[in-house]
């Protein structure tokens, strides 16, 4: 059966696009970005068109093989690598990387799933337009993966998650049929919204092969500021003041704890982290203005002056150039890399109502310190939309690998239980994957979970698409 399946796959996409261990190094496809899992694929298949994706799906269905869709393989919840059975087929979408169309009047662009996010941003920019989805991994993550996980990023506050930026999809179903849903319509009230069903489903219901995305006019000016704040409550109050004064111009509002910034300063001293040593938190704000730089700067400076008068900000710097703004954002985006250099850690991607974040952190910080003395908390994230990356590092000098092996389950339970008490979510933007699938039954409404299982059974009754992800057997 293995030989028959491989022959069928070669017939579908061509022999050169079916990679097996006999002739190729599959490491990049079989190991996740965080080095948490290393699977073993029967083959890696690289189709070059939607029709070839459909042919691959039909071949796998005929031979009873399961498929693992993969884009840039930058996910953080082990959702896009095969298991260790050696029977799963990895379906890499990286060759589907064309920008099919840009409609300036309709403010849309249609791109294939394997397009790297940065390339999509640049294609929009070349037309004088903006595609606002922005992530630290934008140089390697792909649009298909962004939509499959409903990615968030740094501008959700203004533009929404990937779901809000998508108007239409092209999807291959588990039967190998193609749903041609690449609509550029903003209004189409003709039944169930299938687009929203596939966005965020992490490849378990269908394989996204292309998408029609929303574009926006480029702002006339974008300014960035870095401010030190005396507490998380002050950061929340500053967010409210910024929303009041800047309204829709506030496109980014990130918070970074002192220990998170100390890791960047330690492991990446060339980045020159400002204002972190004498404050518990720093905030990164972005103001995008349609009236020009002078207006934007006057607004920004007025906001910061008012915040200082109210005791919400102790010090601040406003970037004087695009290069300085990029440097400030690079510091924020380097926190995960600096944390990785510090050692293996326990990551959390949680969301809490913004108003309750200070109380949540006070409670969770105290609980973890009491239960695991010396534990170090790497707290940062998208405060503007209530999403924290509330990560846990081993005590100084401890064996990080041993800490991860022995404490991850306990730490997760402590954090997730606290998240539940504050009516939050255990996955804000990274997805569920396989790392959190076992936790979902404890924190998801049972009726919602039952409906999800019925949808999966209806669309993929043989559980061939990304099995073991999102929903446990």
Image (cartoon, helix red, strand yellow):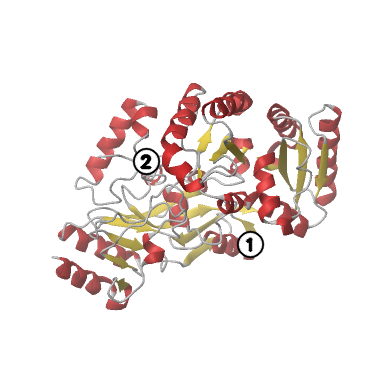
The Cα–Cα distance between marks 1 and 2, rounded to whole angstroms, is 33 Å
Disc assigned to residue 321: none
Which quadrant: the C terminus?
Answer: top left
Q: Look at the numbered disc 2 and give the secondary structure of its residue.
A: loop
> In the rendering, at what x and y percent does residue 76 appear?
46, 49
Residue at the limit of the structure toward the left, as seen here: 1
| Residue 362 seen in the figure | yes
Q: Is residue 377 left or right of residue 114?
A: right
* Of the image marks 1 and 2, the number of the one nearer the N terminus: 1
Residue for point 68% across, 30% down: 232
Disc assigned to residue 125: 1
Q: How many marks?
A: 2
Mark 1 Cα shell of 10 Å, populated few (<14), some (14-19), many (≥20): some
Mark 2 Cα shell of 10 Å, populated few (<14), some (14-19), many (≥20): few
Task: Name the foreground residue: 183 vs 117.
Answer: 117
Residue 392 position (above or below residue 2): above
From the image, tell me which residue sits under label 2: 190
> In the rendering, at what x and y percent does residue 207 appear?
34, 55
| Mark in front: 1 vs 2 | 1
Q: Is residue 151 left or right of residue 338?
A: left
> Which quadrant of the structure image shows residue 436?
top left
| Residue 255 seen in the figure | no
Task: Name the foreground residue: 350 vs 303.
Answer: 350
> In the rendering, at what x and y percent does residue 460 appear?
24, 47
């Amino acid at each position: 059966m293995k030989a028959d399946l491989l022959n069928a796959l070669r017939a579908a996409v061509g022999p050169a696009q079916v990679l097996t261990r006999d002739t190729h190094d599959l490491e990049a496809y079989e190991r996740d970005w965080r080095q948490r899992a290393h699977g073993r694929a029967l083959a890696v298949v690289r189709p070059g068109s939607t029709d070839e994706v459909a042919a691959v799906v039909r071949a796998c269905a005929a031979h009873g093989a399961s498929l693992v869709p993969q884009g840039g393989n930058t996910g953080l919840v082990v959702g896009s690598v095969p298991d260790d059975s050696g029977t799963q087929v990895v379906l890499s979408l990286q060759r589907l990387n064309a920008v099919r169309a840009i409609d300036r009047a309709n403010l849309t662009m249609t791109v294939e799933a394997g397009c790297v996010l940065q390339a999509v941003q640049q294609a929009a920019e070349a037309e004088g337009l903006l595609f606002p989805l922005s992530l630290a991994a934008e140089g390697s993550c792909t649009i298909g993966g962004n939509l499959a996980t409903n990615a968030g990023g740094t501008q959700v506050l203004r533009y929404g998650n990937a779901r809000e930026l998508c108007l239409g999809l092209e999807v291959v179903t588990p039967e190998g049929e193609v749903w041609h849903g690449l609509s550029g319509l903003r209004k189409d009230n003709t039944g169930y919204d299938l687009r929203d069903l596939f966005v965020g489903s992490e490849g378990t219901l269908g394989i996204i092969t292309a998408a029609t995305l929303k574009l926006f006019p480029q702002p006339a000016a974008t300014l960035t500021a870095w401010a030190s704040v005396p507490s998380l409550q002050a950061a929340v109050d500053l967010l409210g003041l910024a929303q009041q004064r800047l309204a829709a111009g506030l496109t980014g509002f990130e918070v970074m704890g002192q220990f998170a910034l100390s890791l960047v300063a330690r492991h990446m001293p060339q980045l020159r982290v400002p204002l972190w040593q004498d404050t518990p938190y720093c905030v990164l704000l972005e103001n995008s203005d349609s009236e020009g730089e002078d207006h934007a700067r006057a607004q920004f400076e007025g906001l910061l002056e008012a915040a200082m008068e109210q005791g919400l900000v102790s010090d601040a710097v406003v970037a004087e150039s695009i290069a300085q703004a990029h440097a400030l954002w690079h510091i924020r985006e380097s926190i995960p890399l600096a944390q990785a250099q510090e050692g293996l850690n326990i990551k959390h991607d949680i969301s809490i109502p913004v108003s309750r974040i200070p109380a949540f952190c006070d409670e969770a910080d105290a609980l973890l310190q009491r239960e695991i003395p010396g534990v170090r908390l790497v707290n940062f994230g998208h405060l503007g939309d209530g999403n924290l990356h509330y990560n846990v590092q081993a005590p100084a000098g401890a064996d990080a690998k041993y800490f991860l092996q022995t404490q991850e389950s306990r730490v997760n339970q402590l954090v997730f239980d606290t998240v539940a008490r504050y009516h939050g979510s255990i996955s804000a933007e990274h997805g569920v994957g396989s790392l959190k699938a076992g936790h979902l039954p404890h924190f998801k409404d049972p009726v919602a979970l039952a409906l999800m299982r019925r949808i999966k059974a209806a669309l993929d009754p043989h559980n061939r698409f990304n099995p073991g992800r999102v929903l446990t057997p």
